[in-house]
Amino acid sequence: MVAADRNYLHAVPEDESSKRRQILDGARKVFMDLGFDGASMGEIARAAAVSKGTLYVYFADKSALFEAILEEEALQHGQVVFNFDPEGEAEITLKEFGKAYIHLLCRPGGGSAIRTVMAIAERMPDVGRRYYARVLDKSVNRLSSYLQARVASGDLAIDDCDLAASQFMELCKASLFLPFVFQAAPAPSEQRMAEVIDSATRMFLAAYRAK
Amino acid sequence: MVAADRNYLHAVPEDESSKRRQILDGARKVFMDLGFDGASMGEIARAAAVSKGTLYVYFADKSALFEAILEEEALQHGQVVFNFDPEGEAEITLKEFGKAYIHLLCRPGGGSAIRTVMAIAERMPDVGRRYYARVLDKSVNRLSSYLQARVASGDLAIDDCDLAASQFMELCKASLFLPFVFQAAPAPSEQRMAEVIDSATRMFLAAYRAK
Amino acid sequence: MVAADRNYLHAVPEDESSKRRQILDGARKVFMDLGFDGASMGEIARAAAVSKGTLYVYFADKSALFEAILEEEALQHGQVVFNFDPEGEAEITLKEFGKAYIHLLCRPGGGSAIRTVMAIAERMPDVGRRYYARVLDKSVNRLSSYLQARVASGDLAIDDCDLAASQFMELCKASLFLPFVFQAAPAPSEQRMAEVIDSATRMFLAAYRAK
Amino acid sequence: MVAADRNYLHAVPEDESSKRRQILDGARKVFMDLGFDGASMGEIARAAAVSKGTLYVYFADKSALFEAILEEEALQHGQVVFNFDPEGEAEITLKEFGKAYIHLLCRPGGGSAIRTVMAIAERMPDVGRRYYARVLDKSVNRLSSYLQARVASGDLAIDDCDLAASQFMELCKASLFLPFVFQAAPAPSEQRMAEVIDSATRMFLAAYRAK
DNA sequence: TATGAATGAGACTTCATTCAT
DNA sequence: AATGAATGAAGTCTCATTCAT
């Protein structure tokens, strides 16, 4: 027990040192609430309950901290949204994907980084590009691959699968994303989301279902 | 009294005093390039070729100046995009609208304020809300009204015209807007825009054309 | 009179705006007392009785302010020390020069920038080089030119006038400069300076007077 | 108690614990390269390959570490430069001394501490004074004693031997030290040093050789 | 003894805003 | 109305130093 204790106590600053986690969590909140420019390192330190100096022990500067958060976001995105079963029936698969996707975008906490990144894409083009490639474009590509598979199997008839994938994803946002992101409406209800996803799927299949 | 008189006489009540115009034009450029936080009043003064002090003669503060620009944007939006002829044939009307809309969003100069407003919507919710209502929602409503008219005339069969309007607008953005706004691709070519709009219109009508 | 008054009042921020002078004077004192690194912009602002922000209205950054002071120092040096009359008799000329030179180096206020520049020459080599060229090397060259003239006139017999000039200047510092700069002794008395200069001159002429 | 015992047993009282040496060596390099203010304890720790914490095990603070280095410098100086043989012939002795002295000052690595100490003499007068007394003044005194001996032996005729000693040392620096310390020239060549020392010796003896 | 994570004071710099002219 | 000099609050980042292990 003593040994265990000591082990426990000594095993601290590893892969996911708790301070690093604290900082990441505090910073995410502040960045998402205030935007990149609006967030101050002081505020972040307070939110993470560490000293300002500690921030710089773990991250080279404000940008590096921000990008670390985007990195996590990217990973999360990859895990949550993209598990397409190429054999999956289109209607069901699209609905499931749509639901996961819109949940990610309209998280009640205002969680999605998409808005924050969009905001600084002009001044920090690399950050914007990287986020687009790692998160948004990847989504499109995965969905596109799935659609391709259904075309091959004869279920769907699509010319440009990349465009179709993008179209479906945009359809999922209809009436939901913009009001949410502009704070003109609270996060949409589950039911409303389901309706919109259903309508998107219907529309998509009306256009692309093989006859 | 004499003084008052002279004051009155010298007052320059022209709706659009040229200084005000100068400031608005310079500020728009700077705000759109750098974002709200990234734009400094000094930079704006330089771009407008007036002194910093003069900025505060015409606008109470940075936010007021920013909102004045959004106001103009809103007016422009209304004029450029929304002139629906309720009698217009759906396919043609939708394509024309789509083209105007996507041009507005993907202006090569990166002009659209949408990104900039999105950036500060969290910190200045009023600004976000107002912009949404005056620009984005209004677009949806106009298109929705048009669709309603075509439903009434028997051309289209739509349940929820607001949703349908939003869907069409989102479809127009597919594969164009996100890469552009994240700087992952240059402004799309005319031809590509036409293809996307065509596809959006086809899809929309496949779902909503009255049988 | 009224006109004169207004003229006077309006003629402010010109060549030598008084704020700029204030800053330069305050900064010189702080830099010379504390060194480049030891001097803080806050301290300088206090010494100059202006706000920290004002410092940056007149100078781009701390280095620019520091270099502006060196610039002044260089001008002063040029004016004070170097007015050699090529016809001047060697003994008298050398004594006069030596006195002016040593006064400059051992100013009671610790004024000379030489120590401060030396301190940062390693980290900011350009500053060091420029100061050496504009102040120290120039002194040597002027004296060297004078010596050359006296060689031509047959008074002196010198092989390497540059070395000779440097030798005389070093001789003037003997027993005075090092104790002063290391704070091991107060500024030397007038009499002591005269003795050292006399001895230096005697030694120099013993070696270089034409026989 | 047992613990105390073990502590006692494990204490490492070796005068020159290797860690201490490591620190001193790393710190010297960093201090000489960057100056007192420019050197950070982090950089020193890295250069010495120890942890930052260990620095404070051996030295109370940054100043104490710096002074320990000066202490070493002083010792070294004493050993290297000053071994005057009172019987030594003046010309030879002076040349040898001059060569050793100038080598010390113009070490290619920029090694000499003189510049670094000069830099902080104003802010830390004790440090400056102590260095002057232990290193510079001591040199003068030793040379002065030697000169005294040669005066006694009738070789030289000098009134103020302290001044003469200082004069010779300054002469040795002529055209060499200032360009080097201001980074306006690389370390002088052996040949150039020899020339300058020869000239200095010639001049010195021209003035002080007994007739 | 040796470590290195953590701290917080303080440095430089920017910028929205005010005010006398 | 227009200016631009001046301000001071606030931001990012560095660094000497401490402390638990």
Image (tube, coloured by chain):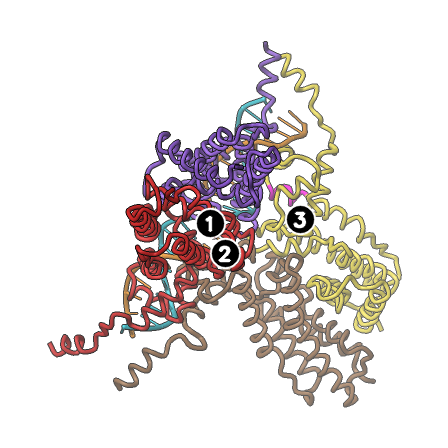
Chain colours: A purple, B red, C brown, D yellow, E orange, F cyan
Which chain letter matches label 1? B
Residue under pointer 2: B194
Residue beneath the point at 63% across and 72% down: C135
Residue under pointer 3: D31
- Quick one: label 2, few (<14), some, or many (20+) residues within 10 Å? some
- Quick one: label 3, few (<14), some, or many (20+) residues within 10 Å? many
Residue under pointer 1: B173
Residue type at tag 2: Ala
Q: Is residue D107 above or below residue D204?
A: above
Q: Position of residue A80 (x, y in %)?
A: 52, 30
Q: Is residue B139 above or below residue A47?
A: below
Q: Are marks 3 and 2 on the same chain?
A: no
In the picture as drawn, the residue positioned furthest to the top comes out as A1
Q: Earlier in the sequence, mark 1 or mark 2?
A: 1
Label 2 SS: helix
Report the span colored magenta: D62-68
Of residues D120 and B5, the one nearer the viewer is B5
Give the foreground label among 1 and 2: 2
Tags 3 and 2 touching, CB below 8 Å: no
Residue type at tag 1: Lys
Q: Quadrant of residue D16?
A: top right
